[in-house]
């Protein structure tokens, strides 16, 4: 391959996107009818009546639909996308609520009108009568209350799963030291710049449907729509235009709107569009993160793990369309880069009357890293040891790879780490942040009246989850290389990275490579963009497809040049004999020769007509398929595991308790780097979301299930001024599991954010941090509690001394 693989090439998408030339969902269908939805104002209620009479008076109204209007499969509950044997009580919502609503924002009525303004006007006139039911809000309430979210789900328990290796009770009982504690992570949400959206148009003459969706999985949306509408899959096209962020919330499919809008477009034979407003996104899309973790750990005098027992209570909201992937990831990725000794993890996934929980960038791993890294810090504190030293004695060593953790990962395959060098990573992150010099820095800060602290957190990230992705590569008669893959793009730089791979494999300029993603017209089979899998899955599929094209090109060129294909090379789009550049032929000409013609359509085509071609008269003109193109798929034996370590220095204000991140360092391993610049960008974006999740972003529900901060006025998101400059370093341990030796990088930056900042704040304050995110108000009250505890202990000591 040429040097383009591994080069920090500037993203080719950016000039178009940053100059306003993007083509997003709401840029389409300007003349389409508009849909709007009546959504529940209650967290839990029975629907006793729906009156649409006033809405019918709105001029420009086209249609109103309730659940009773939905025929056949359209009205059935939405699919449970990822079933699992442990998900014994999986429940999904109806596209429009039937009889009962189970969270604020659940859709009840769909209105179609001439434009969105009129649709909203009509929706406001629809009168829905409710019988409020007692809501279940919060993990502890779900676990202890007699109230039920679903009448047929005992104890609100959707799933319970235990995985273990070794005899955990015996290991902990025999351990010299034992700790028990609880950790909490609150809900948050991804908040992409663009909300969800669907635009559909029906071709009655052809019996076909075209749907544009702001989705992370266009091919799966296509299959879901085809199944629901009873259409052949080849009569449904789904296209993801430019998508303004996904972060996991757009991997759910089909959303109710992705079924209802296409159905209504077909029924009315009109183009229809719906785009989500921001409040809708807050109350009717998806959240993540909420967990309570109970940890019991046994360890020796050096901090070495002997037994680890973790119980997790996971809030999955009102429904489980995406199964229990998030708690499975938490329970298995919790182990990080460590050897845990005996390990047992049990999770309970609970229903609550709140918005559904599905993967959000990190997908259960931030909770996992928080659990294990807080455990490492607690052990170090208990033993009076350096926090990095405790981690060091527990790390998996390079010679121990592949390392089998003895669990089953989210892909249903064994949790086997493929490669890494964790001790070297720890050495380098300490060097990058100045770990050994921090004591002197702290002393100087104290003399200035400042409080500073340092934190460290490690993680391992399963990436490249199967089952497969595909790639198609075609060289046209002008020499342009057309690359297609089915997964979608939401800003990851796919058009750059995939072009680098194809250009490197084929020996052409990147300027000659055109990449298309997320369009079922170009590539019909795919899984989707999530779980840091795009580069691993589609990148390798494109490489394999390109190699097929290269092999065919060399064979055809060899015939034209009367040379052995093994003696040929491709340089800058020209096939030539090695060591003899004069014996050459452009790839564009090879593409022409690959398609024997009877008719000449242009000057180039004359070279492939029946009287122009040479060769044996005894051989057929065409062997194999015409054209210079290839298709291939990559399916991994199991996930590949990236890893990283983050370190941060924070300052806490002695008076206001404000927390400021002074420095943030990242050491990262995602295998061979295709484009370091893009990896850096992914890390920086992830760190921003990690800092946000640690210090700012949370979903606040009251006891009635009302989301109290469902706007950007109240939901805190950091500005660029709150995000520190990120210092990064990389190591590259190639994965042996795929041809390119790569691992995923998309979620790496966000995973240890809460863990590393909690550690740094705890170090600065000397106060235990066991719940995230943390605000200045919460830190202030923790200080008061600590002061009260100190005063109480002092009084006890004085009383004991006096009585003695």
Image (cartoon, helix red, strand yellow):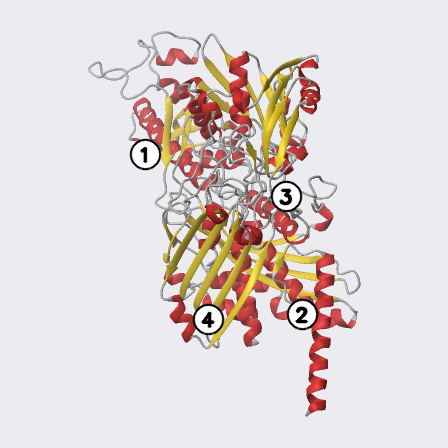
Of residue 620 and residue 674, the one placed in the foreground of this image is 674
Mark 1, residues whose alpha carbon is within 10 Å: few (<14), some, or many (≥20)? few
User: Distance between the Cα atoms at labels 4 and 2?
Assistant: 23 Å
Q: Are marks 2 and 3 in contact (CB under 8 Å)?
A: no
Residue 219: x and y in percent read 45, 28
The residue tagged 3 is: 705
Please tell me whether mark 4 sits on a helix, a strand or a loop. strand
Tag nearer the camera, 1 or 3? 3
Residue 578: x and y in percent read 36, 35
The answer, for residue 28, to whether it is visible in the render is yes
* Mark 2 vs 3, N-terminal side: 3
The residue tagged 2 is: 766
User: How many dots with numbers?
Assistant: 4
**Residue drawn where x is 49% and y is 68% of the image:** 392
Residue 418: x and y in percent read 39, 53
Query: In terms of image quadrants, where is residue 437?
Result: bottom right
Left or right of residue 758, residue 466 in this image: left
Please tell me whether mark 2 sits on a helix, a strand or a loop. loop
Residue 361: x and y in percent read 55, 44
Label of residue 23 in the image: none
The residue tagged 4 is: 298
Q: Are marks 3 and 4 in contact (CB under 8 Å)?
A: no
Please tell me whether mark 3 sits on a helix, a strand or a loop. loop
Left or right of residue 5, residue 415 in this image: left
Tag nearer the camera, 3 or 4? 3
Tag nearer the camera, 2 or 3? 3
């Amino acid at each position: 391959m040429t040097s383009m693989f591994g080069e920090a090439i500037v993203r080719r998408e950016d000039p178009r996107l940053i100059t306003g030339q993007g083509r997003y969902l709401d840029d389409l269908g300007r003349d389409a009818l508009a849909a709007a939805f009546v959504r529940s104002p209650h967290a839990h209620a029975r629907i006793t009546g729906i009156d649409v009479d006033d809405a019918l008076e709105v001029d420009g109204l086209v249609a109103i639909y309730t659940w009773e209007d939905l025929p056949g499969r359209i009205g059935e509950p939405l699919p449970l996308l990822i079933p699992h044997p442990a998900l014994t009580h999986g429940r999904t919502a109806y596209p429009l609520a039937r009889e009962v609503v189970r969270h604020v924002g659940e859709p009840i009525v769909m209105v179609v009108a001439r434009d969105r303004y009129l649709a909203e006007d009509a929706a406001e006139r629809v009168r829905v009568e409710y019988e409020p039911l007692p809501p279940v809000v919060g993990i502890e309430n779900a676990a202890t209350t007699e109230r039920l979210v679903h009448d047929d789900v005992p104890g609100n328990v959707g799933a319970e799963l235990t995985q273990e290796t070794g005899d955990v009770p015996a290991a902990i009982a025999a351990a010299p030291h034992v700790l028990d504690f609880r950790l909490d992570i609150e809900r948050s949400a991804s908040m992409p710049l663009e909300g969800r959206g669907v635009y559909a148009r029906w071709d009655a003459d052809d019996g076909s449907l075209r749907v544009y969706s702001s989705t992370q999985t266009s091919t799966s949306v296509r299959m879901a729509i085809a199944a629901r509408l009873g259409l052949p899959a080849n009569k449904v096209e789904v296209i993801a235009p430019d998508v303004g962020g996904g972060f996991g919330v757009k991997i759910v499919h089909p959303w109710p709107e992705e079924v209802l809008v296409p159905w209504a477009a077909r029924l009315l034979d009109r183009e229809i569009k719906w785009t989500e407003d921001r409040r809708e996104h807050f109350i009717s899309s998806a959240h993540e993160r909420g967990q309570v973790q109970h940890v019991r750990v046994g360890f020796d005098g050096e901090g070495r793990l002997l037994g680890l027992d973790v119980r997790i209570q996971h809030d999955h909201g009102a429904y489980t369309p995406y199964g229990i992937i998030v708690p499975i990831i938490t329970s298995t990725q919790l182990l990080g880069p460590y050897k845990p000794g005996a390990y047992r993890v049990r999770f309970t996934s609970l229903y609550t009357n709140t918005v559904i929980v599905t993967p959000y960038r990190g997908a259960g791993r931030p909770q996992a890293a928080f659990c294990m890294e807080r455990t490492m810090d607690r052990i170090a504190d208990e033993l009076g040891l350096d926090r990095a030293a405790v981690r060091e004695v527990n790390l998996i060593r390079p010679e121990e790879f592949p390392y089998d953790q003895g669990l089953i990962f989210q892909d249903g395959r064994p949790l086997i780490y493929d490669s890494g060098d964790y001790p070297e990573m720890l050495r380098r992150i300490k060097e990058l942040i100045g770990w050994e010099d921090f004591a002197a820095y702290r002393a100087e800060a104290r003399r200035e009246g400042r409080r500073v602290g340092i934190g460290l957190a490690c993680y391992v990230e399963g990436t490249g989850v199967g089952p497969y992705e595909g790639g198609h590569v075609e060289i046209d008669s002008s020499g342009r290389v057309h690359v297609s893959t089915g997964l979608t793009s939401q800003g990851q730089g796919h058009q750059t990275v995939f072009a680098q791979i194809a250009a490197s494999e084929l020996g052409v300029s990147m300027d000659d490579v055109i990449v298309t993603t997320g369009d079922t017209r170009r590539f019909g089979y795919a899984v989707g963009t999530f779980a840091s899998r795009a580069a691993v899955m589609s990148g390798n599929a494109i490489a394999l497809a390109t190699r097929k094209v290269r092999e065919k090109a060399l064979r055809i060129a060899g015939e034209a040049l009367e040379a052995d294909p093994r003696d040929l090379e491709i340089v800058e789009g020209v096939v030539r004999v090695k060591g003899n550049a004069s014996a050459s032929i452009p790839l564009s000409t090879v593409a022409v020769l690959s398609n024997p013609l009877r008719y000449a359509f242009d000057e180039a085509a004359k070279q492939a007509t029946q009287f122009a071609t040479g060769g044996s008269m005894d051989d057929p003109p065409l062997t194999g398929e015409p054209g210079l193109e290839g298709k291939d798929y990559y399916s991994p034996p199991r996930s590949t595991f990236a890893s990283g370590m983050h370190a941060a220095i924070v300052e806490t204000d002695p008076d206001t308790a404000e927390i400021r991140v002074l420095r943030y360092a990242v050491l990262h391993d995602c295998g061979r780097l295709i484009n370091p610049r893009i990896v850096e960008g992914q890390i920086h974006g992830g760190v921003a979301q990690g800092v946000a999740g640690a210090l700012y972003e949370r979903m606040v529900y009251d006891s009635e299930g009302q989301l109290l901060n469902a706007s950007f006025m109240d939901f805190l998101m950091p500005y660029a001024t709150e995000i520190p400059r990120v210092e990064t370093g990389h190591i590259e341990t190639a994965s042996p599991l795929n041809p390119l030796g790569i691992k995923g990088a998309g979620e790496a930056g966000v995973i240890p954010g809460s863990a590393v900042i909690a550690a740094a704040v705890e170090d600065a304050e000397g106060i235990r941090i066991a719940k995230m995110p943390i605000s200045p108000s919460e830190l202030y009250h923790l200080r008061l509690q600590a002061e009260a505890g100190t005063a109480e202990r002092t009084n006890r000591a004085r009383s004991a001394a006096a009585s003695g």
